[in-house]
Image (tube, rainbow, N blue to C red):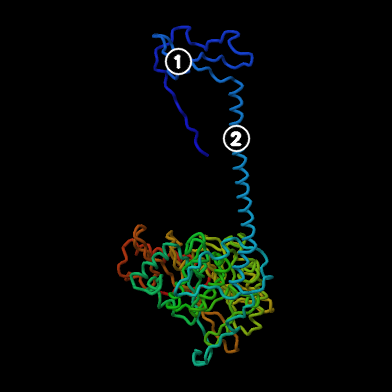
Amino acid sequence: MEEKRRTTSGAPRHAARPAGEGSAPKKRPAGSTSASGAPKKRPVGSAAASGVPKKRPAGSAPQRRPSPSPARYSRRQRNTNWSMVLALAIIVIILIGILALIILGVKSCSSGCSSGKRAVANNGPAQIYMETPEPQETPAAQVVDNVIDVQPAETAAAEPTAPAVLPTPAANVRTDANGLRSATIRTAGDFVIHDVVFQSAARLAKQTNSSDPFNFRPMLNLIRDQLENADFTVTNVDGSMGGKQYYKYGYSGYPQFNTPPHILYALVDAGVDMLTLANNHMLDGWFDGLMAEIANVEKVGLKHVGANRSAEEKNTPVVYEINGIKVGFMNYTVSLNEMDKKGVDSRALEFGVNATKNSDPKKDAKALRDAGADVIVCYMHWGKEYEEMPDDNQKKLANILVASGCDVIVGGHPHVVQYATWLSGTNQFGEAQQTLCLYSLGNFLSDQRLPLRDGGILFDFTIQEQADGSFSIINPSYLPTWVWRTGDKENGYDYSVVPIGKYLDTRPEGMSDADYTRMLQSYQESINAMQKGNAGTLIAD
């Protein structure tokens, strides 16, 4: 709308009018007009007719031009007002028309654009879509990393890519003097990749001339030997690892974790064998991001449990042979970072995630037994964050897993260490069940710096074959770890995971006195937490 201009006029510069003179226009004498009302004509030859202005007598005031009559003025004002009303009405009609076109366009795109993108991404029948996802569900601009294949796999009728049992060549089976098999499984705490952590990996990539945009390998240099010193190493990364295009802000940390999938290369390099994908941030890249994450994990050769591309895959038992022992794996999460309440694709809860709300551990454990599993290990993402003791819900779920027939339970998510213990009961097969349960591993790599949260443990147990052909869980043990952070906020931080026991007497090169003191405190905090339970022996290295 244009702004109305204001005008001002100065006072007339002629001499002041004498009192009473010129204060009002002079009235025309009665009868001075014609019968028709026309003004009386000037005589021919007068000054007005000749075009020469009539001179005013000296000292006289100028005569004012009569003002328009009130009737004439009101007609002009009414005409102006009606013009303004008409113009405003036209503007309103135009705006309403534009708004209607916009609404029609949005409705058309919501019914056509989204379905078109889904059809390209999944190549599956339309009837599997039970509800329309939030806009974030459809990937934004397709920015594809050069190293990791971030395109989602087919989800409609995907066949399980891994066999029910992955065999191990006989030459790799280790036995003791009596010919009995054994296998040691080691598990690390949570990888929680805050934005400052992956920014550090980006700087490391430049410093090391890496072909990858992120290089997480140096962060695991000090603990690489400890991670791979087992027959089978397992860990969890809290967050989606499908690629940056699966979240509108790209790679991100808290509260919606979209972790660069290049961390997978560092995990393989450090000897990790399997990832547990069921965690509270697994849908932070939405359903398509989860599907791409599964593809990425498999591309680098890592095994996985806890996420699925189809209902058939969800119902397929996960059994791997380790030193000739068939180990069945289960993995569940209690929560999903509220993503299940934000319009996520309905397939996520139908089969995509292994959550406690859509899973039956007794059914899954029976399927593992039927598939030939000698031992069942369940990884749980549960509990309250930063609580030093397991809560009632953890204990209740642990008892359900004991009754299901799980031999080992390993927990994460509280981000602090919680103790390990032995649980006893009778399983669904009518057998006496003895179960090793570690409630929480704590953090393995993160930017959390408060006491108890800046460290965690590596947790071990060994599956030992007995003379009668049965298997027992023996030698539960733990190694405290600590995240050593250097640098500053302005220039960026650097991170290194330290196996504390190895550096009790001789600190890592370059570690300050303050950091060394804090590392020793973290070591004692983990020991204190584990001593609250009745399982787990401290190991130094």
Give residue 271's mark.
none
Label 1 residue SS: helix
* Front residue of this view, candidates 68 and 205: 68
Label 2 residue SS: helix
Q: Residues within 10 Å of mark 1 (few under 14, many from 20)?
A: few
Residue corresponding to mark 2: 83
- Measured as percent of width and height from the top left, residue 190 is found at 49, 68
| Type of amino acid at the residue the image marks with label 2 | Ser
Placement of 391 over or under 157, stated as above or below: above
**Residue at the (65%, 75%) spot, across then down:** 311
Q: CA distance from mark 1 to mark 2?
A: 42 Å
**Residue at the (66%, 83%) spot, across then down:** 370
Q: Can you tell which quarter of the image residue 166 is in?
A: bottom right
* Front residue of this view, candidates 236 and 406: 236
- Measured as percent of width and height from the top left, residue 368 is found at 63, 80
| Type of amino acid at the residue the image marks with label 1 | Ala
Please, which residue is most extreme toward the front here?
44
**Residue at the (59%, 70%) spot, across then down:** 332
Disc on the earlier residue, 1 or 2 = 1
Question: Which corner quadrant holds the C terminus?
Answer: bottom left
Residue corresponding to mark 1: 47
